[in-house]
Image (cartoon, grey):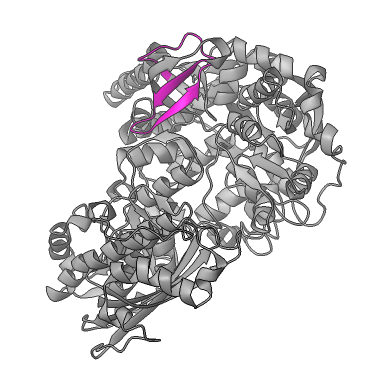
Amino acid sequence: MCLAIPGLVLSTSGDDLMRTARVDFGGVVKEINLAYTAEAGIGDYVLVHVGFALTVIDAAEAEKVFEHLERIGEIEAELAAGRTP
Amino acid sequence: MKYREEYRDPAAARRFADAIARTVTRPWKIMEVCGGQTHAIVRYGIDQLLPPEVELIHGPGCPVCVTPVEYVDKAIEIARRPGTIFCSFGDMLRVPGTETDLAAAKATGADVRVVYSPLDAVEIARRHPDREVVFFAVGFETTAPANAMAAWRAKRDGIGNFSLLVSHVLVPPAMTAILGGPTNRIQGFLAAGHVCTVMGFEEYFPIAARYRVPIVVTGFEPLDILEGVYLCVSQLEEGRGEVENQYARSVKREGNRPAQEIMRQVFRVVPRRWRGIGEIAESGLGLSDPFRVFDAEERFGRVAAGAEIAGECISGLVLCGEKKPYECPAFGTRCTPEHPLGVTMVSSEGACAAYYRYRGVATAEAAE
Amino acid sequence: MADDFVLACPAPLPGDETIKLAHGGGGRATERLLETIFRPVFADPELDARHDGARLAAGATVAFTTDSYVVRPLIFPGGDIGSLAVNGTVNDLAMCGARPAFISAAFILEEGLDTALLSRIVTSMAAAARAAGVRVVTGDLKVVDHGKADGMFITTAGIGTVVAPHPIGPAAVRSGDVVLLSGDLGRHGIAVMAAREGLGFESEIASDCAPLAEPVLALIEAGIGVHCLRDLTRGGLASALVEIAETAAIAIRIEEAAVSVRNDVAAACEVLGLDPLHVANEGRFVAFVAAEDAERALAILRDHSVSVGAGAIGRVVEDRPGRVTARGLLGATRVVDMLSGEQLPRIC
């Protein structure tokens, strides 16, 4: 259960549990509740489920999937060249 | 679209799939817990990319499917009351109750409205002070913070004509129930990434330790699921049973503390019946005492415990990974998405519905 | 589009601001409504003749279709129930390989409907008819009690003259045929759903509601052997392909990468949990042509503004009859099926 998708925070308004943001999901903009992401600001990507931002997406961690892939790619290259990685 | 497209790159997907194939030396059964993950697996054909040794079992990760039939019946009963507006997420409209569903009730005159956010239901209540507005609060922990906020707002603003019919379910107790089952064959889990965004993953350490199973917190895009499978299979091959976080861009170990705080204020843990599985202790959420006044069951009568669906439906066994949909004698014949017998054919994420739609009946023929 | 058209209707007479049951009675009130709102706008001699039916020169082989329009909301970004009714009827005729010519329009109005709203929709209908080159020549008007008609329902029938030399339909589909799609998917369904469900989107997504006769007639006039045509409506591309595959007892394989979806429509589908293959369209069609005609057919389609985004999306293949499959972005193949029931946003 879990249709949550990332969007870009364009602007914010309000405070605390009433804070909201206009979030761009790639051409479609919707007002989203920021009650649970006080740290979210303009330019951040947030993960949104049923109109609520659940977290700010960590850009550095997001890269790690691809760093992992690169390491796997290196292992493959080693194997292909007949070397034990 | 950032944080989506790049996780669907075909070349990268193949690289993970190859790495999994190289790593695997024997068969493994891995369960992906969340319906959203099942959806991605079936949509992108991820199981077709995996080596045959790796079998993905679709878990009970669909709160829509596991909502007890008596709650759907109660929802329909409330919706049919004159002067009531019944609000729900779209998913619940075609879940069969004992005789009918919310969509049919709507077609015959009940005021049933689909909402995107629970706060939309609160606004409807605010705009119609003369009507009773009830919101069907279903979901896993992912949706609980939003549903909690609806109750919290209604209390703060004194919206007395608003109430919630709560049928929330919690994931870790279900995983424990599956692992503790006598015929359990699941050897590793891809934990529900968005549930963990809210709750963190502390709860999984005791489970992993007790049953010695790898639990990998996994996201929903193809690369997430493939990396999750890769990490899980690697652990299994190495004889490890640890908690790992594949979805670190959205999940922190402690989860979302402010969300958990509001959930703690609005909800309390209760026993919950899971359709097709039965009662699991401490596996659900109900409203806490300060919010009891917003409980639709207080206003419209308690939901009576119903009988389990008997007959040929084996959804309980399918949900726990013990049987495949096509091993059911009714699959594709007496039980189809148009005429579902049980939960796993009801929701599009249900294992039986996914098998039916994406494989047709060919798999059943092949299995015969 | 309707907005370009200059409103030339007189203001409603006092007492006629909303529709009353009397307006459907067939007497003076009905006559006043027809005289002030309907006839001036359609401006057709057959309608002005005020007869029970129209006498028309129809030509040799006739295509004939009927449809009902019950869309909510009545007005949405990119169109309204009126332009939808005209274009839907025109498109059904075009899919028969016919030049659309005449339309009838029967209106069921709900008592209490705002007359200015009715006028706006009728004006839009007339504009759509003019743009599509068809005449609205006969019609009917009834009024029902408040609460019985969602504002208004429109039922149309359409007649066109068949210009295609051979019958167009599923029976003519052959193994190896190429499937062409006239443009990007999903705009109508998202536009209407966003407006109806009050989803609070800020977006530019407008319905793709449009007449499709021009590119179809161009294909036929160029001598392209068009085997089958189907305009996409409710149920989207998936339903159209499955219907054709089941009727013709053939199998179709499409490439998901070849199916075009605009970024913002794709984003809206993601937010709502919808599959673009199932989302409604009102200005798109598929054409099945022999493989050797595909390139030429595409060039012709791309020459018309409504099908400028046309592309080849798949083929008729050897597989289980009735089976439609899609090769996905990751190279895996899945079965494409029709939706059961109405499409709803999901959170799960």
- Nearer to me, B215 or B148: B148
The image quadrant of residue B240 is top right
Q: Is residue B34 magenta?
A: no
* C36 lies above or below B81: below
- Looking at the image, which residue is at 55% across and 30% down? A50
The magenta region covers A19-45
The image quadrant of residue C204 is top left
The image quadrant of residue C224 is bottom left
Left or right of residue C147, residue C174 in this image: left
- Looking at the image, which residue is at 52% across and 33% down? A3
- Nearer to me, A33 or C17: C17
**Residue B153 image point, x, y percent:** 65, 21
* B179 lies above or below B311: above
- Nearer to me, C104 or A22: C104
Left or right of residue C337, residue B147 in this image: right
Whether residue B227 is visible, yes or no, is no
Left or right of residue B71, residue C255 in this image: left
**Residue C221 image point, x, y percent:** 13, 75
Please state, as top left, top right, bottom left or bottom right, where the N terminus of chain C lies in the image: bottom left
**Residue B325 image point, x, y percent:** 64, 51
**Residue C227 image point, x, y percent:** 27, 74
The total number of labels drawn is 0
